[in-house]
Image (spheres, rainbow, N blue to C red):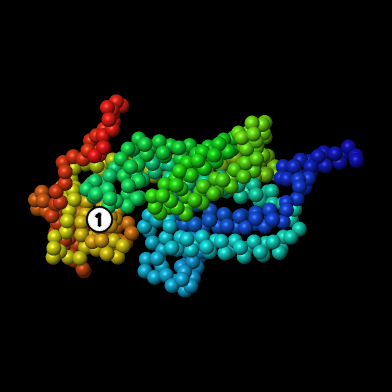
């Protein structure tokens, strides 16, 4: 070896070490097949599930965010809808993609089946074409990198929903006047969490901390542990209180666990066996040059900054609008539809006969079967208009409102299909012990009623 060739050889060796060398043991056939399937399924779910994806980072640019979601989600959603109707004979609401606050619709589950089937076929083709591959360490690092970003986004999004306590708001009049035995498990849980905004903020802060830590390389493992711990509780809530975000919560928990896989052995050695251990996981894909490493680091910082700014502004604005809407107004209260009124807006395909308006951004509608439906409101006192959008069915409708006296309200529309609905006020208690009990450090006995 000549002196002139030494630097070149060393440079090549360093470049190879930067990526991964061939000295590492070859993966077993089972490990390679398992990785191929995991890679395909998780990448499909991360980019194409239509809920919170890696592209949520584009939220400050809604047009780009909407276009990317459409490009990636639409092909799978349309195919899933097609085979669900053809093969399983889905009908009605179950056969349609709809905004309803649920991530556990029939089509959501079938979408995961589509991802699973595509991953199985893709694994078979990949295994046939790439039989001689020794390992997938580099691709594994990229998968863990994207999983880390995806878990971080999900934790931050749902965490800030609670830090600014808007996900679970204080119990509405409809809920306060509902016998506990009539409540759904989810309403009981939402009432418990929304009753105490401070507790909701603490829960949200735990999610935000997990999301922040997992997005920062030196603290990524701690972030994965915190995220997995928090998401275990969320999954249990969703399962045992029938909250319809089970699919997404379970996937986030699985992704947090997958991110920790390379370090499970050293964690076990350190915490259980009380032995010295060295962490083995790589938190960023290999880069061949210093500029590539710097570029990736800058990209991660920009990604985190966009997430923080986006959620702070978006959720902060929503919370400001909510707090501004908690004020007296003539339409506030519980209202029952008078007999003989026009057919009202429908929710879930059925008309509602009672509404409660607690603040000027959100209310509740009750259908004849007793089910409650969230209603999003846009109130204009000067123009005497009230926009109402039901969650679960029915589009936005703008009504003119009048309150002839304290006990009656009239909602009406004009133009084609004009309707007029008259309501009478439903008497409600002046105060509720649930809201007035307050905090007591010292109790001679526990107050139950």
Residue projecting furthest to the right: 1
Position of residue 300 measured from the top left corner of the image (x, y, whole percent) = 56, 42
Q: Is residue 424 left or right of residue 11?
A: left
Mark 1 crowd level (few <14, some 14–19, many ≥20, 10 Å Cα): many
| Residue at the (58%, 64%) spot, across then down | 118
Task: Choose between 250 and 409: the one closer to the eye.
Answer: 250
Position of residue 420 measured from the top left corner of the image (x, y, whole percent) = 16, 62
- Residue 156 showing in the rendered view: no
Q: Which residue is mark 1?
A: 365
| Residue at the (54%, 61%) spot, across then down | 115
Q: Is residue 445 left or right of residue 121?
A: left
Quadrant location of the N terminus? top right
Q: Quadrant of residue 398?
A: bottom left
Quadrant location of the C terminus? top left
Q: Is label 1 in a helix, a strand or a loop?
A: strand
Task: Choose between 90 and 265: the one closer to the eye.
Answer: 265
Q: Is residue 230 left or right of residue 292?
A: left
| Residue at the (55%, 57%) spot, across then down | 44
Residue projecting furthest to the left: 405
- Residue 260 showing in the rendered view: yes
Q: Quadrant of residue 280?
A: top right
Task: Choose between 311 and 178: the one closer to the eye.
Answer: 178
């Amino acid at each position: 070896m000549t002196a002139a060739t030494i630097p070149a050889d060393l440079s090549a060796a360093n470049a190879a070490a930067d990526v991964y060398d061939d000295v590492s043991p070859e993966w077993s056939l089972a490990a390679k097949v398992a990785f191929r399937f995991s890679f395909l399924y998780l990448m499909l779910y991360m980019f194409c599930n239509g809920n919170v994806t890696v592209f949520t980072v584009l939220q400050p640019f809604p047009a780009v965010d909407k276009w990317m979601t459409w490009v990636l989600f639409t092909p799978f959603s349309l195919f899933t809808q097609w085979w669900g109707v053809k093969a399983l004979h889905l009908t009605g609401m179950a056969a349609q993609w709809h905004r309803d606050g649920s991530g556990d619709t029939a089509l959501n589950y079938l979408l995961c089946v589509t991802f699973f089937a595509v991953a199985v076929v893709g694994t078979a083709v990949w295994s046939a074409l790439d039989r001689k591959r020794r390992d997938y360490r580099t691709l594994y690092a990229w998968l863990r990198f994207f999983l880390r970003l995806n878990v971080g986004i999900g934790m931050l999004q749902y965490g800030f929903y609670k830090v600014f306590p808007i996900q679970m708001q204080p119990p509405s009049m409809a809920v306060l006047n509902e016998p506990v035995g009539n409540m759904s498990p989810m309403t009981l849980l939402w009432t418990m969490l929304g009753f105490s905004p401070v507790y909701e903020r603490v829960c949200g802060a735990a999610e935000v901390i997990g999301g922040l830590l997992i997005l920062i390389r030196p603290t990524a493992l701690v972030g994965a542990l915190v995220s997995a711990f928090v998401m275990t509780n969320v999954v249990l809530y969703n399962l045992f209180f029938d909250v319809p975000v089970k699919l997404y919560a379970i996937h986030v928990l699985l992704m947090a666990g997958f991110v920790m896989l390379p370090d499970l052995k050293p964690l076990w050695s350190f915490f259980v066996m009380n032995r010295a251990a060295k962490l083995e996981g790589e938190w960023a894909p290999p880069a061949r040059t210093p500029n590539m490493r710097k570029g990736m680091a800058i990209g991660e910082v920009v990604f985190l900054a966009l997430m923080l700014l986006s959620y702070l502004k978006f959720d902060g604005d929503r919370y400001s609008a909510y707090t501004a809407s908690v004020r007296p107004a003539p339409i506030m209260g519980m209202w029952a539809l008078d007999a003989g009124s026009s057919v009202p807006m429908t929710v879930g395909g059925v008309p509602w006969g009672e509404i409660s308006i607690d603040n000027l951004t959100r209310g509740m509608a009750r259908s004849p079967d007793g089910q409650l439906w969230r209603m999003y409101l846009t109130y204009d006192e000067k123009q005497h208009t009230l926009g109402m959008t039901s969650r679960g069915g029915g589009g936005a409708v703008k009504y003119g409102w009048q309150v002839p006296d304290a006990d009656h309200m009239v909602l009406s529309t004009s133009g084609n299909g004009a309707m007029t609905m008259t309501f009478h006020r439903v008497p409600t208690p002046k105060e509720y012990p649930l809201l007035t009990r307050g905090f007591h450090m010292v109790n001679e006995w526990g107050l139950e009623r």
